[in-house]
Amino acid sequence: MIVSLIKMRFQRKRYCLGILLICAVTFGLVGCSTFGSKKDDTGRVIARRAQVRSSTAVVAADLVEVTRGDVVDILDSDTVDGEKWLFVRAHDTENTEGWIEARYIMTQEVLDKARKLAEEDKDVPAQATGQLRASSNLRLTPDRSGKDNIMMKLESGSSFEIVGWKRVPKTRETETTESDDAPKAGSVQRSPGKTQNNADAEEQVVEETDELWYKVRLSPSVSPAPAGWVYGKQVELTVPSDIIFYRTGREFVAWRRLDDEGSAATTTGAKGKDAAKEMKPGSWVILEKGSTSGPHTADEPDFDRIYVLGYDKYRQEHYTAFRSSQDIRGYLPLKVEGQGDNKTFTVRVQGEDGQIKEATYSLSRDDRGVLRVTSPSSSETPRKKR
């Protein structure tokens, strides 16, 4: 009797242990299944070329090469000697896994923010084109006081469309910094000796309380991020060769071609300023701004004069079709609408009452083919052909 009771208790214990083991295995499988189904973070390669390596060591082996725009899965991260590294899975035939420097990768989170930034101006035509004088950071916001908003570093000579700009107050962190070229993590910037030229530059910086930023639109060949902000002092406007010789004494702020062939500001702008030499001569609307001896302010207008340049294809020469007779307080964006010879362009202008309203100028051609501009202001009349 006692032996039978002991056997029953032993069997019951084995049964309970079996049930617990089955539950543990089941839970483990469910847990593993849940973890495995979780989508890895992804990123896009922003360098022209980069290597996925076997480790973070200097002597690590190169496993596979990735190029700009390639997608990788981000599995883990680590920081070595102040430099952040990502453990990634490449989308090659072997799904190679290895380490790559974080500065070569743009995470999906950052890319989504850049796409949202581009969506804000999807209906705004390019106002001008530009390129970088030196390598510079592409940022999510017009602020260079920190590194959190940096998306990537654009190479010197990178070209882009300009859809807008903004003047922002300088901060204490940026008062003595002329560029927006962030040092590599862990490195130290050297401070050059103060020469007379440096002293003059610093004096000029003190006078300017605001700094200019350009909101730019980029092609996939330049950046996976479709839009962002670039520090103005790093940007050179790439005025088309067809009109650059008419820039005398005033700065060209924005321009749009009025002919049907390449009506956008960036017919060839995305290819760089040299490609503009191949453009055929045509008619343009140009927004100009006069120079000022005083410091710029955040509330100043974008432009103060409108200049319409016509083109006589028979004489193969340009002529002044219209020029606003007095300085105006104008604001972007510049929009050109219509087809053929019947077009309009619209800008925003501040009236005498201080209100900013849209002003639409009508374009037409007379029986001799001369471009005429009808201004919304009765005080401004079309100019005769020279």
Image (tube, rainbow, N blue to C red):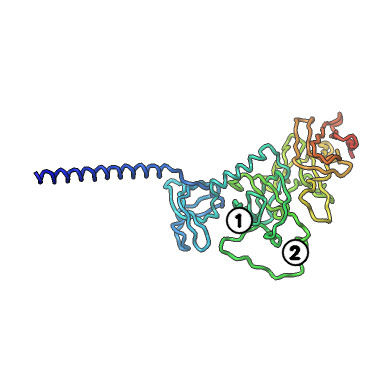
Query: x, y (%) of residue 99?
Result: 47, 55
Q: Residue furthest left?
A: 1
Does residue 166 appear in this view? yes
Kindly indicate the quadrant of the structure image that contains residue 259: top right
The residue tagged 2 is 202
Q: Earlier in the sequence, mark 1 or mark 2?
A: 1
Question: Tag 2: residue type?
Answer: Glu
In the picture, the quarter occupied by the N terminus is top left
Give the structural element (helix, strand or loop) at label 1: loop
Left or right: 183, with 248 as reference point? left
Does residue 370 appear in this view? no
Label at residue 65: none
Measuring 80% from the left and 49% from the top, which residue is drawn there? 251
Q: How many numbered marks are there?
A: 2
Compared to 320, does 231 lie above or below? Answer: below
Question: Tag 1: residue type?
Answer: Lys
Query: x, y (%) of residue 57?
Result: 46, 62
Q: Residue furthest top?
A: 367
Query: x, y (%) of residue 281?
Result: 78, 41
Q: Residue furthest front?
A: 2
Binning the other alpha carbons within 10 Å of mark 1 as few (below 14), some (14 to 19) or many (20 upward) gives few
Query: x, y (%) of residue 134?
Result: 67, 56
Label at residue 147: 1
Give the structural element (helix, strand or loop) at label 2: helix
In this rendered view, identify the residue nearer to me: 276 or 306. Answer: 306
In this rendered view, identify the residue nearer to me: 374 or 188. Answer: 188
In this rendered view, identify the residue nearer to me: 44 or 377. Answer: 377
Left or right: 59, with 147 as reference point? left
